[in-house]
Amino acid sequence: MPPQIATVVFAAGIAGLFWLNRDTSVRTSKALWLPVIWLWIAGSRSPSTWMGMNMEEIPGQLPPTSKLDQVFAGSLILLGVIVIARRRDWMAVLKTGWPIVLYFAFCLASLTWSDYPEWGFKRWIRALGDVIMVLVVVTDAQPAAALRRLFSRVGFVLLPASILLIRYFPNLGRGWTIWGNVVVNTGVSTNKNSLGALVYLISLGTLWQLIVLLRDKTQPNRTRRLVAQGTLLYFGISLLHTAQSATSLACFVLGAGFMVVTARPFFRARPAAVNALMLGVLLAGGITVLLGGQAEAAAAFGRNSTLTGRTELWQQVIPLVPSAIGGAGFETFWVGPRVSEFYAIRGGLTFTNEAHNGYVEVFLNLGWLGVCLIALILGQGYRKTVSVIRRDPALGVLLAANVITVAIYSVTEAGFRILCLPWFFLLLSILAASRLITLGEAASTGVESVPIVLARNSDALDLNPTLDRRRSDSARENLS
């Protein structure tokens, strides 16, 4: 099929998926398109890159920046701030997610000892964009519906587009490994690992929607939506195989297995059973390492015992951190003369601007204090998401699966960096769980100012305006 015809066919198919998945029984704010666009960019390439304005990054120098990208990101952030400023509960969400606030405050403070504070501050502002977009989603009048539409709108565009580029536009959808000797499939992303992260996270959200639709036969337009979500999951599984990203494949298998198992009635009212299950998984992993079976485990997912050279990279880069306590400063380790020293140690081998390990990456930039804050975020996130399972089992297991898989993903990839989808969905899962718990507690105490309707399983804990005053508030939010 000629590429031009294939483009038309795929565009029609994408439009068909949106049509099949439409659900007029719920209304979400039009502002939800802001985080959707944000994720379209974070999950693919920057506007300047799509327009062919590629700028080469030179080791030892500050990475080049694009005014177009800065204006585009700044506009989205500004619009997001306007939206959440008009909503009443964003402060309550941040208050319950205080480890995230503490982490970002420390990131800002770390710039006081950074060699490049101005560069780091720009990156910090961009990092705030992730939080703002997450708040736009979780403070929506119907947060569960907003989550469904976020996953669908991002997946319906980026996953089919990746297949289109790989098959019909290989100059855009394929690339070379960093050694330049193997062709890899990148899709809409810039490398196979970014494509894998996009696919595994969207596929977990798609699986969640399929579980809800299969269990609840009263869902409106159920058959059409099953077709749309089933097609999207098929695309996701196909792309996971195509991307050949072992980490993302392992995370999807683990996350999907966790969702299917813990969604069973036995686990719904027993958070202790979920904790016991996770403890068993951790013990199994620990025993594998103690018995020397890590090489076999890595080989099962297409890795060697060095995780494709990652362990050697960690040994070389960790001694270069200027302070074990506070690191080099937020997002400023991989800039300046330090990078030239790193390449001298490696003998000029291959270019990289990350440690390929989220915890090592945080240590390089923020030291042990930053690593401890990440551990605090993961711990609180796991606790909160597991507690949501009792209120909304299907949604709770998705949020918990995101936290667990991002924690594991970050062992071999830098999963806690800005404009990184695992980091975005980690924040989204934690703050969504915080909001849903807050709403559930308000409903159980009969607080009149927060109307809760415990409707279908998929919409449990959605905030539905029932009084005239609340209808007007919701209308104003929709206009925003």
Image (tube, rainbow, N blue to C red):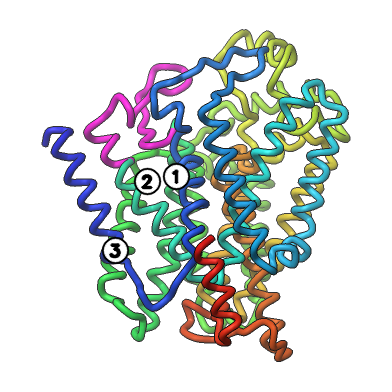
Position of residue 215 in the picture relative to residue 107 (left or right): left
Q: Residue at x 60, y 84 (%)?
A: 452
Q: Amino acid at mark 3?
A: Ala
Q: Are marks 2 and 1 in contact (CB under 8 Å)?
A: yes
> Can residue 183 be found in the magenta stretch?
yes
Q: Read off the residue under disc 2.
A: 158
Q: Is residue 320 above or below residue 255?
A: above
Marks 2 and 1, how far apart at CA: 7 Å
The quadrant of the picture occupied by the N terminus is top left
Position of residue 118 in the picture relative to residue 190 (left or right): right
> Can residue 43 be found in the magenta stretch?
no
Q: Residue at x 45, y 48 (%)?
A: 249
Q: Is residue 456 above or below residue 399?
A: below
- Pick the residue in front: 164 or 258: 164
Residue stretch rendered in magenta on the structure: 162-189
Position of residue 267 in the picture relative to residue 324 (left or right): left
Q: Read off the residue under disc 3.
A: 228
Per the image, label 2 sits on a secondary structure element best described as helix
Find residue 40 and name its label.
1
Q: Is residue 78 above or below residue 187?
A: below
Q: Residue 225: horizontal and vertical position, in percent?
A: 31, 70
Residue 466 visible in the current orientation: yes
Q: Tell me if mark 3 has few (under 14), some (14-19) or many (20+) residues whose alpha carbon lies within 10 angstroms of its own.
A: many
Q: Amino acid at mark 2?
A: Leu
View extreme (left): residue? 1
Position of residue 61 in the picture relative to residue 190 (left or right): right
